[in-house]
Image (cartoon, helix red, strand yellow):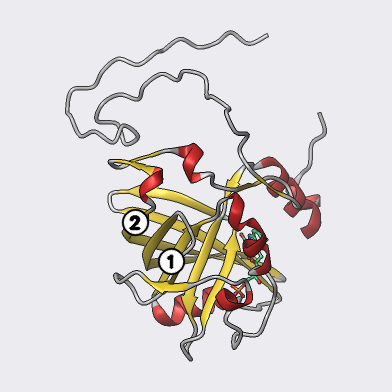
Amino acid sequence: MTTFEVADLDLTDAYKLMTGLIVPRPIGWIGSYGPDGVANLAPYSFFQAVATNPPVVLFSTGMADGAVKDSLANCRASGVFTANLVDHELSVAMNQTSAEVEPTVDEFGLAGLTAKRFGSVDAPGVAEAKAVLECRVVNEVVLGVEPLRHAVTFGEVVAFHVADEVLDGTRIDAAELDALGRLSTPPSSMPSAGWQAPAMPQPAIGSPWSGRGSASPQPISTEVPSRR
Ligand SMILES: Cc1cc2nc3c(=O)[nH]c(=O)nc-3n(C[C@H](O)[C@H](O)[C@H](O)COP(=O)(O)O)c2cc1C
């Protein structure tokens, strides 16, 4: 094994290790309006679900030499955004919206997408996406030191919009959703079709992961696989 002490790494190597090791990462396609009402859209793979009561997602914006990307500037000004999910068919459009363009450019139009107001927050969602989360900014945390800092924007989800073919009640069909994740850079990658997860022990009822609020915990497997 090779050990990398972070204090000895340059910016590129730290980035390569982080983005190569923490995989796959979901992609949040962040929609927002600029101050002049221009619709903005950009992919962020430093994107994650971090709470469910209420639901909260985050995305993290790199700020090289203090430069603030449009998504962050818009979220700071408007306090709202959408997090859209990218599927296989939208991958080319997603890449097009990662272009560094002036804030006056409508990136929905650039990628041939439809900016749609879904009605709960004043931020544009991707009409073509299979799922759109409307979010209200609840916090921002800035991490790191110059020349590369990151601003982590936390958004409380106020509404989920999900295509009917993806849904069974509130259960999501992962194959229909066909969400893209990112491996190392490039390229973006898809989960393999037909891959089945091995059987997992069920979380105790009432645990934060169970999604069920009962007070009586059920036993879970305590078997620890032996290591050789
Ligand atoms: C798949 C993918 C994931 C990306 N993830 C991030 C990210 O997590 N953080 C970031 O700062 N930039 C990320 N980028 C780059 C931004 O999308 C790019 O800088 C974009 O121009 C920002 O647009 P904006 O200024 O409209 O926000 C990613 C690009 C791609 C293609």
To which quarter of the image does residue 171 belong? top left
- Residue plotted at (41% across, 44% down): 166
Q: Counting other residues with Cα less than 10 Å from the Cα at mark 1, is it few (<14), some (14-19), or many (20 or more)?
A: many
Please state the horizontal and vertical placement of residue 152, each as a whole percent of the image. Answer: 51, 63
Can you say which quadrant of the picture contains the C terminus?
A: top right
Q: Earlier in the sequence, mark 2 or mark 1?
A: 1
Please state the horizontal and vertical placement of residue 196, each as a whole percent of the image. Answer: 54, 24
- Name the kind of residue labelled 1 in the image: Thr
- Name the kind of residue labelled 2 in the image: Phe
- Residue plotted at (30% across, 24% down): 204
**217, 195: nearer the viewer:** 195
**224, 167: nearer the viewer:** 167
> Residue extending furthest bottom?
36
Q: Counting other residues with Cα less than 10 Å from the Cα at mark 2, is it few (<14), some (14-19), or many (20 or more)?
A: some
Left of 19 or right of it: where is 158? left
Seen in the picture, residue 102 relative to 40 is either above or below; the reply is below
Name the residue tied to disc 2: 160
Seen in the picture, residue 221 relative to 160 is either above or below; the reply is above
Left of 118 or right of it: where is 194? right
Look at the numbered disc 2 and give the secondary structure of its residue: strand
Please state the horizontal and vertical placement of residue 12, each as a whole percent of the image. Answer: 80, 57
Which quadrant of the picture is home to ligand 1?
bottom right
> Residue extending furthest left?
215
Left of 211 or right of it: where is 45? right
Instruction: Say whether marks 2 and 1 touch (CB < 8 Å).
Output: no
Mark seen at residue 82: 1
- Residue plotted at (42% across, 49% down): 50
Please state the horizontal and vertical placement of residue 186, each as a whole percent of the image. Answer: 76, 52
Left of 76 or right of it: where is 206? left
**142, 83: nearer the viewer:** 83
In this orientation, does residue 45 appear? no
To which quarter of the image does residue 219 belong? top left
